[in-house]
Amino acid sequence: MIGTVREIEITTEMHASYLDYAMSVIVARALPDVRDGLKPVHRRILYAMHDMGITSNKAYKKSARIVGEVLGKYHPHNDTSVYDAMVRMAQEFSLRYPLVDGQGNFGSIDGDNAAAMRYTEARLAPISDLMLADIEKDTIDWNDNFDTTLKEPAILPAALPNLLINGANGIAVGMATNIPPHNLAEVVDATVYLIDHFDRIDEVGVNDLLQFIKGPDFPTGGILFRYRQGTKGEEEIDAVSQGYATGRARLIMQAKAHFEEMSRGRSRIVVTDLPYQTNKTNLLERIALLVRDGKIDGITDLRDESDRTGMRIVIELTRNVDPNAILARLLRLTPMQQTFGMSLLALVNGEPVTLTLKRILRLFIEHRQEIIRRRSQFDLAKARARSHIVEGLLKALDILDEVISTIRRSQRVDTARTNLMRAFGFTERQAQAILDMPLRRLTALERRQLQDEHKELQQLIDYLEDLLSDGGKILGVIREELLALRQQHADRRRTQIVERAQGTLTATDLLPDRRVWVALGANGSLRRQDFSGINRAGLRQAAQNAAAALLTANTRDQLFIFSAAGRCYRLGVHELPQEGRRNLADLTDFSRRETIASMLALPHPANEGFLFLVTRQGAVKRIAVADFTQAALTALNVISVNGKDRLACALVTPGNGEVMLVTRMGRSIRFPEEKVRAMGTAARGVTGINLKRDDEVVAALPVAPDGELLTVTSAGYVKRTPISEFSLQGRGGGGIIAHKLDERTGDLVGAAMLTPEHAFAAFVTAKGVAKPLGLVAIPSSRRSALGSPKVDLASSDAVAAVQAVSPVVAAMDSPPPPPDPQLNGRGDAEVPSPAKDNQEKTEQAPAKKKPAAGTTSAKQGKSGAQRKTRKLASETSKQSKPATGEQPAPKQAAPEPANGELSSRSAKPRRKSRRDGAQETSPPADANNASTRRRKAGETSQPEPEAKRSDGPRRAKRTKKSAKDSQPEGKRAAAASVNQSVQASLLDEPAATPKPAAAKKPTRAAGKGAGKLARVSSVTGGRKKSKNQ
């Protein structure tokens, strides 16, 4: 049967149909919702996985099963589109915080496709559990699915601002969105700041939020320029601020690269990060093509040395070519520099809107207000219903005989229910609960449990009613949940923000951003060591030449070395040698006759804080950091010393803190640093402490309010004293006792300020032996105590210095997540030390235990170096002995490794082995805030096994055996003490000798082919091979 035919203008029909299609694409396909940051297909995938029970703590399931679930219930489209969407949510190089935990081949940054869905498996990532939390508590609205047989969520509860932290991109009809990802910790900090100022939110501007969110944080790292060069002579444009204020901007991204020197005057460019969404294989092919066509000269080799530890593209250059010019040309002609078109377009109430950063955060807060309000109403209704039933059960227990008699007289269940309601005033639900109650509930114990349950329910009801009546308390709940989320999932920023425009990078900006150890010997020898951990090279290198100073620094930092004569020498950390040592006199104007007093590392440029100088005779002086860091000279007089006085210590202070001076005779003084006015570089200073005859200052420390003072004497007597026992005094006084001394202890030789994140201390002896000792093994004592002999010394040896070390300092790679911001009354963030939060996490997660349901493993997210650090703290905590008044007989120190036993920097260290020895118990430490937490961490933490390297350990070549080496292994192990075992395995273990180098390839003769690309082995996935292979 033919229906009615209506004539209509084709233009009208095309206009209406295209609008319907456009709105369908915009709302149901291409654009994310501002509240949960998800497109419909992503939301359906996550909900389907949640409905299937594939949470982060459950087993993986085949991707084909997940795709089938999504297609059959919620998303009746092509299976490829669903699988591709799920694959992208599992790729670490696509999403800053992946929402799906994939197992199998899910693609790579080289452009490789994921394996077919029948091969891969997946489950929800831990962060997705937060996206779906409380979804069963009537917190969201639900829509019918495509065939109206099921319900699907219209939005997810989304406990985190997913739109910002993971970003989004999509092309709709007539519009497109391109939202960059951000760092979770920074976004949470900005959201918390907005919550704290919610009553005057209109006064908050973009610059207020920019103090927390520095800019986008891409999963692939790289460099992002905050400014963009203007056109037609215009000034530089603050692109990041413009994007957050208007919702649109063009951001310049750039690959992260640095230069490395090679032999024979050659150099190479090493690329470690690429711009977001850059295909590595296409980049390599592009560079090879440019070299082949002669558009770039001076490149001899191109290799892809990337592995599971990170990206590394090596571009070797010819001799006498400017690497900066080659890099500039690569940035201009290849995808190593790209533009990111920011467009903050998202759906607000179903309509596409271009948003600002402030409005995105505000809409997220309003969304969470609605979620928490509905969740509280659900919990309140449930608590009231249960309380009503419990009240009926308690009432029935009070008249138990009458209730039983009434039930026994009833013929049927519904009659008994009616009789209970009529005789005793029970409601229908209470009467049914009484009838359903088993006989065991009639015991006295069950009655007490019901009474306790009723009390808890009333407290919960009161809390929820109070929460729903006060919008400010709902904001407080949002704030607390965000901070808890930050504590659990935050990590360090990957993308470096450069506060300049593109094309203005300096040589310092191109230096690799790495943490290193810097060891300064008493004879002026300097060396830097990669951050391989305190238990390996760090302390061993410090002990080699009786190290005068040992610190951690960044390769971009400036190193300031102070001589005893009051002169400061400056050089870059990157200028220090990694192989071998160089004397300070070879790098600066330092005279070999001078004595080194102190060493500091400061970021470049450093403009905040003060340099605090202390001489041996107790004179103190403050200089603004900017006054001497911005000086053009590499050597500068910072303090004038007369007579026998010499500079003893140099430290950096914030300007409003406190300083403590400790002397050789065990005296100390604590005073505000503001009591010392800022002076010029030529001033002599003022009196900090009034010393007795023959006394001198041995340490100057910044005061930590909740810390402890660690002091050590020359004979190895050590103790910890709470800083609260040292009262605040005025500058220039005689001080108070810090460590009691007698003929057994010797003089006080060192002190360190301990905070809760410190794990152990490294004691350096006069003979250059570094001895680690766990802080849990050092008892806490009062100021007037002698301490305990905890440092085992060889005959004629003595302690010379002490260094407190934290797990963060000892870690090899990324630091722990940032701490929760503590916002003061002005709304400014007062961020505590990240190491403190990391220490508390380590305390709360004992090792070697299977995670319970709903939790993640304690090993998850921890680096190998952090596990080594926990093992070191656990082993060194076993070194303590019962404190006695007599000093134990000195034990023979473990021998230093011979020169032939030390490996080059490229050799892989052997796995350390624990020697058998007598285990000694340590006395319990006194209770105080820092020491109690440290003791609990030492008791609960257990060493975790190291991950084995796939290539296996390299064997060390044996040199001439000493008499000790020729002894049976069992006798040496039995004779070794615990201290010697830890020292030998962690400090003095000879590193493996590297394998014999392969035969050198013949040098390519200069000629017609010089300057062109020799080969591009990395494009095919292999490293550079020798010709004979």
Image (spheres, grey):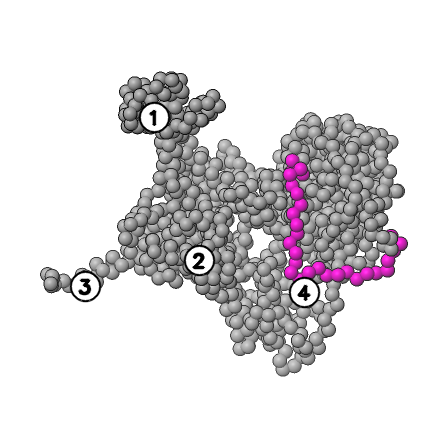
**Which residue range is magenta in the image?**
936-964
The magenta stretch spans residue 939: yes
**Mark earlier in primary sequence (2, 3):** 3
Residue beneath label 4, please?
Answer: 261
Percent position of residue 325, x then y: 58, 67
Image point 68% across, 67% down: which residue?
262
Could you give the CA–CA distance between mark 2 and mark 1, rounded to whole angstroms?
Answer: 48 Å
Left-right relation of 565 to 402: right
Q: What element carries label 2?
A: helix
Q: What element carries label 4?
A: strand
**Mark earlier in primary sequence (2, 1):** 2
Percent position of residue 978, x then y: 78, 43
Crowding at mark 3 (Cα within 10 Å: few <14, some 14-19, many 20+): few
Could you give the CA–CA distance between mark 2 and mark 3, rounded to whole angstroms?
Answer: 45 Å
Front of the two marks 4 and 3? 3
Q: Do the residues labelled 1 and 4 touch (CB within 8 Å)?
A: no
In the rendered image, the quadrant that contains the N terminus is: bottom left
Image point 36% across, 33% down: which residue?
377
Q: Name the residue type under label 4.
A: Glu
Examine the rendered structure and indicate whether residue 220 appears above or below residue 441. Answer: below
